[in-house]
Amino acid sequence: MDTRSKSRRANSFQIGVMGTGLVCLALVLAGLLVALWPQLYPRFPPPGAVGDSGVQCLAGWCPGPDARLLAMVMVAGGLGSFVHVAKSFGDFVGNERFMASWIWWYVLKPFIGMILAVILYLIVRGGFLTVSASGEASNVNLHGLIGMACLAGMFAKQATDKLSELFDSLFRTRRAASDAKRKDVLENPVACIIDAQPPIAGPQATYINLRGTGFARGARVQVNGEGRETTLADSTRLAFQLLPEDVAQAGALVVAVVNPPPGGGSSAPLMLAVGGPVAAVDVAPVAALRAPIEEEMAIYDHR
């Protein structure tokens, strides 16, 4: 059983609105980029008013070259973010894992891409891009600039990480950054299994408790590569149930804990021994631990 309540998953209406909104966003941004592109590039139209000779306007707005470049960079950053958002949306909806709590991430992501593209544009234009003394916009490689803005929006995380490395090197401090101290990190860690209780499974011991670190909400136990019913207590304890075929004969099972994205991934495997059919194992401690875990999860679901 997935530890995430099904009530947290987005319903068909929310998915439909999100999908329609993403399609409309792509059409609007693509239309804006085409409308803003200089018709006589590499010569940029001058600023002016509607009806002036040589002036290229958009809905009554007739910007100069610099303002046009800035707007085009923002639009390109939004288009790059759309590619990232649309791919993620399609993947999670296709796997029936789209959670309603992530809707605002999808809404804000294009705006993050826009602002990040503008920041990189200002950095490049201000110090790393050679222009003539006149500073004319026609000296700018518009194709390369728009391509850079699209990539900044598409790979916003990598771009911000690189900027973070740059500033960490330039403005290194002795104290750890405040974000590193956050307890509510945005990316799930990779789990680590320390031990299992009981250490030997069997027909009379199918409920297994794992102790370790980094167990995230939505973590799922895999036995020999297949998911099993999982109940999470906290970041250091979880319980799962083996199937009858798992303990049908003596041997060993490969157990791993998989944390969901973002981040996450599979832990290093733990070899869980399986005793023979006559193995008698005291499961009272296991049941005693699983009861408060299920009680805790029931309280969480009612929240």
Image (cartoon, rainbow, N blue to C red):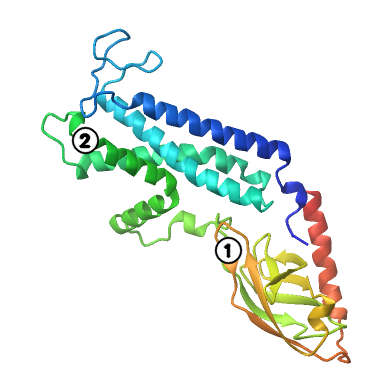
In this rendering, position of residue 108 left or right of residue 40: right
Can you tell which quarter of the image residue 256 is in?
Answer: bottom right
Residue at 28%, 25% in the rendered image = 38
Residue at 74%, 65% in the rendered image = 233
Task: Kindly state the secondary structure of the residue where label 1 is placed.
Answer: loop
Mark 2 or mark 1: whose residue is earlier in sequence: 2
Judged from this view, the residue extending furthest toward the top is: 51
In this rendering, position of residue 128 left or right of residue 148: left
Give the mark toward the camera: 2 or 1: 2
* Residue at mark 2: 140
* Few, some or many residues within 10 Å of mark 1 (<14, 14–19, 20+): some
Can you tell which quarter of the image residue 40 is in?
Answer: top left
The alpha-carbon separation of the residues under discs 2 and 1 comes to 42 Å
213 in relation to 254, above or below: above
* Residue at mark 1: 264
Residue at 33%, 44% in the rendered image = 148
Which amino acid, by three-letter code, is at mark 1? Gly
**Percent coordinates x, y for residue 168 in the rendering:** 34, 57
143 in relation to 183, above or below: above
Nearest to the observer: residue 99 or residue 39: 39
* Few, some or many residues within 10 Å of mark 2 (<14, 14–19, 20+): some
